[in-house]
Amino acid sequence: MKSLSERMTLYMDAGFPIIYIETFEEDKAERAIVRASSNREILEWNVRGLFYSKSDEKREGISLLEALNNFANPAAMDNEKFARRFSLQRRVLLIKDAQELLDVPEITAQLKFLSEQIISGELPDANIVIVAPRANVPKALEHYVTMLTVDYLSTAEIRQIILDFCEKQDISQPLDDFLRELSLAFKGLPEFEIVNILALALADNGEIGRADLKLIHDQKKQLVQKSGIMEMVTVKEKLSDIGGLENLKNWLQAKAKVLKNIDKAQEYGVDLPKGVLIAGLPGCGKSLNAKAAAALFDVPLLRMDMGRLMGKYVGESEANMRHAIALAEAISPCVLWIDELEKAFAGIGGGGGGNEVTTRLFGTFLTWMQEKDGLAFVVATANNITHLPPELLRKGRFDEIFYVGLPSPAERAKIFQIHIGRRRPKDLPAIDIAKLAKATEGYSGADIEGVVKDAIESAFTQDLPSVTTDTILHAIHNTASLSVIMKEQIEKMSKEYKDRHFKNASV
């Protein structure tokens, strides 16, 4: 894959008028712009004014609109020297700090005018480059703008940054195994943050050691949180915390073997895992499996909030989706958890502007799922698959689609053992688990957890020495089961899963 500067050079040489670089790493983008500009002077406008790369000349305080007006018609200026300084011929205009300003009609109009001059040849060897953290392309400029993104650092690049830092600080390089672990831990972070964390670790204890992995994790968690569209979830759950769903758990364990031995697996001919869709009733373990999968794979868990993807600017929602995908791939290996997928893509194919945006988001996601070649393993959950677009359920999008139903008697017994054992282990031997499992026909896993919590609280408030079978049975009788609350929906969904031949998560 070509570097950012190589891609920019191609577009600049071909006379593309506006190149829009979507990135938070301005320094990295600027280095690429300098390399791609082929010694042409770069005129940079930012919130402080206009600055020239080949001289000390600057116009502090000049607004973007005023600068563009001058660039659009330098011949109209009284001062010949200023007229030459405001000519864009054989120059690159770099615009920063202007994401919100691009919606100003006069600014949009002048950028369009300059673009047409570049295309027609009236401004030879001229280009406009916009650098901003988010895409905001006005409709009037869509045909003139080429979008580029700054690639996240590869593991090899991160490794070199660590080695360069150690050499510069005259400290021992980490051993190969730890260097590999350290490089993976830094994935997704920009270069300046990596260097800052290494410096902080060195200042703290005079070396870079395994204790610093927590510091890296905390910084990465902040990075994900600052994106505003994802969060890094702290995982405590394990597969052993899930009662039943053995088919799904066995499948995840097989995928874990592939992911943990990915080089050998690919040499053998195994495809990169894409992900899994877990559909089914609420409270039956879908989200728990997403968390347990991350723990099993020993990778970070990223949760994508589809509601936060929606932006107010044209193209912003799609840019948010691309940014989320890029961040997940940069941090990979990871689990990308998309909860209640059907809510995210409701209304696909319907009318209205909102549905058009949703359709484009869906298209971006679908293409990525089909073509992705990274180690971001998707765990998508859905309560109602009748609201999902059929394209998403085709073979090749996910590695497998499972459905989770209400737990069987054996699974209910296991769920009771887990929750009682976690909270009141000393009471567990005296409790008749089989009797409780029989009494909870039609209860979900979440129902059973709620019953156990209620029973323990009741025993405490009554000053009882222990939690008994009768205490829990009383809580059961006071709890309406999911099968009662959602009787019709459950029957309809169960039929739908069987008709579509989804794999049963339970044995």
Image (cartoon, rainbow, N blue to C red):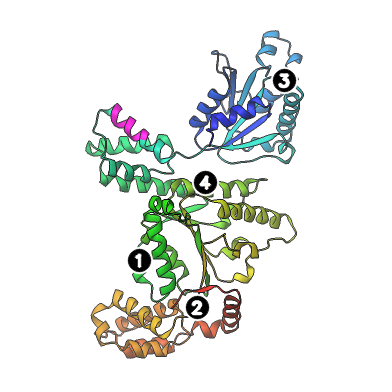
| Residues shaded magenta | 160-168
Q: Main secondary structure of the magenta part?
A: helix
Q: How far apart in space, not on screen, are marks 1 and 3 (Cα)? A: 62 Å
Quarter of the image for residue 63 reads top right
Quarter of the image for residue 64 reads top right
Q: Position of residue 187 (x, y in %)?
A: 41, 44
Q: Amino acid at mark 2?
A: Gly
Q: Which residue is mark 2?
A: 405
Mark 4 residue element: helix
Other residues around mark 2 within 10 Å, as few (<14) / some (14–19) / many (≥20):
many
Residue 238 numbered mark, or none: 1
Q: Taking 167 as reference, is 305 left or right? A: right
Mark 3 residue element: loop
Q: Position of residue 331 (x, y in %)?
A: 44, 47
Q: Which residue is mark 3?
A: 123
**Which tag, 1 or 3, sits closer to the chain's start?**
3
Looking at the picture, does residue 344 appear above or below residue 313?
below
Q: How far apart in space, not on screen, are marks 4 and 3 (Cα)? A: 35 Å
Q: How far apart in space, not on screen, are marks 2 and 4 (Cα)? A: 34 Å
Q: How far apart in space, not on screen, are marks 1 and 4 (Cα)? A: 27 Å
Is 315 in front, or is 473? 315
**Which tag, 2 or 4, sits closer to the chain's start?**
4
